[in-house]
């Protein structure tokens, strides 16, 4: 399985980022080999629609699962269209998250927030 | 003459000032550009109403023509497009209707389609034409409605011998702006001949005044200030105005009779002679300011 996790830093030992759309990096790790690649999230500085752009990058990375604390409606729509599963993150590093995922200790993310894009002009 | 009434924050009295100015002027056109909360009509209670729908452009994809080059996805600054599993997804509420994707598509797979976002209500209250922009709840931006509202004025003018100045001189247009200093306000003041700022004499009020003042300066519009809810201590705002050389043309008291009239949806200038005089005075002042401005231009 390829797991994408929003990350504070650019290694697998970095902490999970609170934000999905505006995270600086995504770490995309193979749950078997623990090999990983890092994606710079170009959406972090978007005016709006960051979730969509970030989700597009995750889809393009070939991930089949996303582990995140939060996910907005638009990002969720994109991920679902690509049949990507969304799991709820727990505090820790990306590698800990991957281990917990393998051990079946993560649950599906069911709370999809309506998004922040309607604020401001 | 088109007078835009604006303030940084909501609740300062834009609608109160706009409605009373339009009433005091008699034959006026009142345009409510505060499309998220169009309240002017609560005071005017316009009759003979009719509605016109407003649509905005969204791109429509022809899946047979789309080759998945993603030029549109990369181009969209608002991230309203995504390409997933050989399918282009459109997020209508993020689209700003710039049409860039439609122009850019090498396959001509994108075309313009419409999306209903609100309407314009036309009505009449005595001598005042009341034109109200209404944005549907949940929509992200009212700019397309504001654009349409103000284009009505262009159409009006075009009808009258292709010249804006052909509007009868006494028929002022009062534009009740949305709060803030963002896109929707810029759109609302773009065609204005005069910007009337409204501010409360508080620290918060001053902060917001500073924001709209900078916007008005940026647009190079003739302008002046009306202080609203004056409780006797307006030193803070007067100092700011004297530093920036802003004319304060009136100070409206924080009075219970105004509050009472407002709470009943009545027009203060219609209820009380002294407020009619106050608002007529504001109009006279604006006319003088604009004439003076025009003279200065001629001298230059």
Image (tube, grey):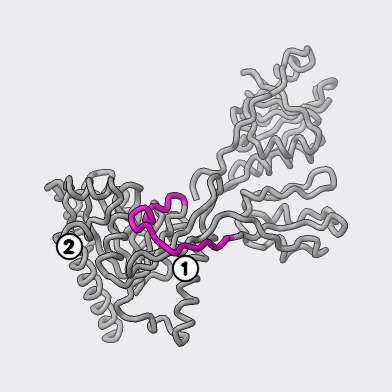
**Nearer to me, A62 or B113:** B113
A84 drawn magenta: no
Q: Residues within 10 Å of mark 1 (few under 14, many from 20)?
A: many
Q: Position of residue A53 (x, y in %)?
A: 68, 44
Q: Earlier in the sequence, mark 1 or mark 2?
A: 1
Q: Is residue B220 visible?
A: no
Q: Position of residue B5 (x, y in %)?
A: 33, 61
Q: Position of residue A106 (x, y in %)?
A: 72, 16
Q: What is the secondary structure assignment of the residue under circle 1?
A: helix
| Residue B179 left/right relative to B261 | right
Q: Which residue is mark 2?
A: B278
* Mark-to-mark CA distance, 1 and 2: 27 Å
**Nearer to me, B183 or B49:** B49
| Residue A12 left/right relative to B130 | right
Quarter in which the C terminus of chain B is drawn: bottom left
Q: Residues within 10 Å of mark 2 (few under 14, many from 20)?
A: some
The span shown in magenta is B36-54
Name the chain under label 2.
B
Residue drawn at (75%, 63%) of the image = B111
On screen, A31 above or below B91?
above
Q: Residue furthest right?
A: B64
Residue A104: name its quadrant.
Answer: top right
Quarter in which the N terminus of chain B is drawn: bottom left
Residue drawn at (71%, 19%) of the image = A97
Residue A38: name its quadrant.
Answer: top right
| Residue B272 left/right relative to B166 | left
Q: Position of residue B202 (x, y in %)?
A: 23, 45
Q: Is residue B297 visible?
A: yes
Q: Which residue is mark 1?
A: B150
């Amino acid at each position: 399985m390829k797991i994408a996790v929003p990350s504070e830093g650019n290694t697998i030992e970095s902490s999970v980022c609170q934000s999905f759309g505006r995270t600086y990096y995504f770490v995309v790790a193979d749950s078997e080999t623990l090999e990983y690649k890092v994606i710079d999230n170009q959406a972090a500085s978007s005016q709006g629609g960051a979730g969509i752009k970030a989700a597009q990058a995750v889809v393009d990375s070939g991930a089949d699962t996303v582990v995140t604390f939060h996910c907005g409606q638009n990002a969720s729509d994109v991920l679902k269209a690509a049949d990507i599963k969304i799991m709820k993150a727990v505090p820790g590093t990306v590698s800990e998250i991957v281990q917990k995922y393998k051990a079946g200790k993560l649950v599906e993310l069911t709370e999809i927030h309506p998004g922040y894009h309607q604020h401001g002009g | 003459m088109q007078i835009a009434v604006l303030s940084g924050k909501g609740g300062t009295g834009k609608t109160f000032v706009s409605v009373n100015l339009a009433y005091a002027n008699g034959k006026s056109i009142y345009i409510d550009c505060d499309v998220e909360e169009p309240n002017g009509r609560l005071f005017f209670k316009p009759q003979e109403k009719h509605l016109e729908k407003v649509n905005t452009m969204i791109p429509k994809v022809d899946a047979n023509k789309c080759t998945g080059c993603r030029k549109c996805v990369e181009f969209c600054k608002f991230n309203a497009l995504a390409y997933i599993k050989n399918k282009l997804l459109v997020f209508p509420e993020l689209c700003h209707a710039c049409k860039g994707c439609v122009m850019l598509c090498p396959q001509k797979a994108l075309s313009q389609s419409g999306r209903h976002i609100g309407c314009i209500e036309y009505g009449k209250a005595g001598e005042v034409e009341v034109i109200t922009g209404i944005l549907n709840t949940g929509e992200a931006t009212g700019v397309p409605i504001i654009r349409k509202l103000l284009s009505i004025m262009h159409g009006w003018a075009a009808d009258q011998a292709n010249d804006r100045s052909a509007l009868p001189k006494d028929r002022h247009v009062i534009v009740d702006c949305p709060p803030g200093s963002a896109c929707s306000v810029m759109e609302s003041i773009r065609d204005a001949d005069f910007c009337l700022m409204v501010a409360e004499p508080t620290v918060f009020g001053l902060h917001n005044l500073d924001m709209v003042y900078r916007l008005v300066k940026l647009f190079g519009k003739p302008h002046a200030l009306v202080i609203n809810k004056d409780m006797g201590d307006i030193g803070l705002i007067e100092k700011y105005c004297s530093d920036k050389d802003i004319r304060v043309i009136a100070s409206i008291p924080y009075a219970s009779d105004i509050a009472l009239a407002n709470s009943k949806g009545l027009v203060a200038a219609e209820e009380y002679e002294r407020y009619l005089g106050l608002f007529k005075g504001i109009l006279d002042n604006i006319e003088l300011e604009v004439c003076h401005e025009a003279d200065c231009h001629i001298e230059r």
